[in-house]
Image (spheres, rainbow, N blue to C red):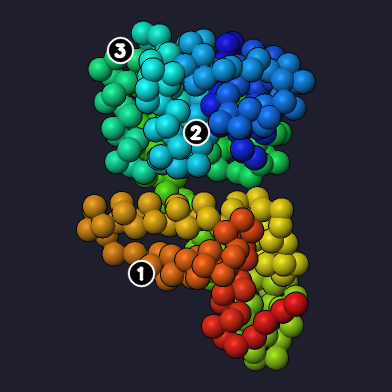
Amino acid sequence: MDIGFVGLGNMGRGMVQALLRAGHRVVVWNRTPERADELVALGAVRAATPFEAAEVGVVFTMLADDAATEAAVAGPHGILAGLPHDGIHVAASTLSVRYSAELAERHRTRHQHYVAAPVFGRPDAAAQGALRLVIGGAPAAIERLQPAFSALGQQQFVIGERPEQAHAVKLAGNFLILSMVELLGEAFVLVEKAGVPRERFFEVAAAVFSSPLVERYGRTLLERRFAPPGFRLALGLKDIRLALDLAEATATPLPIADLIRQHALEAVATGKADRDFAALLEVIEAHAGIGHA
């Protein structure tokens, strides 16, 4: 299958590796061209513009936010201009529900398809083809994408025919993940101030609340593995803001999300934007009057 891929950050590079390993021909573009060098050495084809990546008929975008996606989509060298009639744009990153719905309409008026397929999983899972895909779009378009989706993910969840529904689920899921980091961090600080080693509490939490998320993020917090980031704090702040935007649009109070946004903003303001979101722990510790070297 010929696939265009726009956006070669940590997640995008891993996803392209998985597609290449499955035998797909992948045409790649990134705003900073050198990010494509390693993938070209593995067999990917370099595109000069997003237009060229989209010309193959199916193009994935894995970009930081709405603005970065719009920069690749719009204009004479963008995806909208390059994608042929009946072509498919797959948005794999976390976008706002509003912008995802807008993209669907813009593609529809050009007789193109738009499928939302945001993913759960870190860069290592992307490279292994072990992501979980949350999908929204027309059934026929989703069926056409199965060779690519099968290469990228271990599990698919089709949410509905409106692409923005998949992004609503992704935002809710990210809210849960970020809440887990916040709650585990608060619990670690609480037991430490009560004189209990964090390691002992983690043994109990991992057993009683058996979950891959508790195990993964609890250990990350315990070992203070904040770099290199699996999920940058700046992106976590962006996602919690998008969740709060959706909450406001749907009149849904999210008091925990408000707290996480405040802590994440403090972390970014103190120079932690490019560290893993688990570095939120340092803000929680500072509020409690403790610190770790």
Q: CA distance from mark 2 to mark 1?
A: 28 Å
Q: Position of residue 173 (x, y in %)?
A: 47, 51
Q: Earlier in the sequence, mark 1 or mark 3?
A: 3
Residue 291 at x, y = what percent? 67, 82
Label 1 Cα neighbours within 10 Å, binned few <14 / some 14-19 / many ≥20: few
Which secondary structure, mark 3?
Answer: loop
> Under tag 2, what secondary structure?
loop
Whether residue 190 is visible, yes or no, is yes
Residues under labels 1 and 3: Cα distance? 41 Å
Classify residue 259 by image quadrant. bottom left
Q: Earlier in the sequence, mark 2 or mark 1?
A: 2
Please name the residue that numbered disc 3 is placed on.
111
Quarter holding residue 254: bottom left
The x and y percentages for residue 6 are 54, 26
| Amino acid type, callout 3 | His
Q: At which x and y percent is residue 257? A: 40, 64
Q: Give residue 92's mark.
A: 2
* Pair 1/3: label in front: 3
Which quadrant of the figure contains the C terminus?
bottom right
Mark 1, residue position: 255
Residue 280 occupies quadrant: bottom right
Q: Residues within 10 Å of mark 2 (few under 14, many from 20)?
A: many
Q: Residue at x 30, y 12 (%)?
A: 111
**Could you tell whether 266 is left or right of 103 in the image?**
right
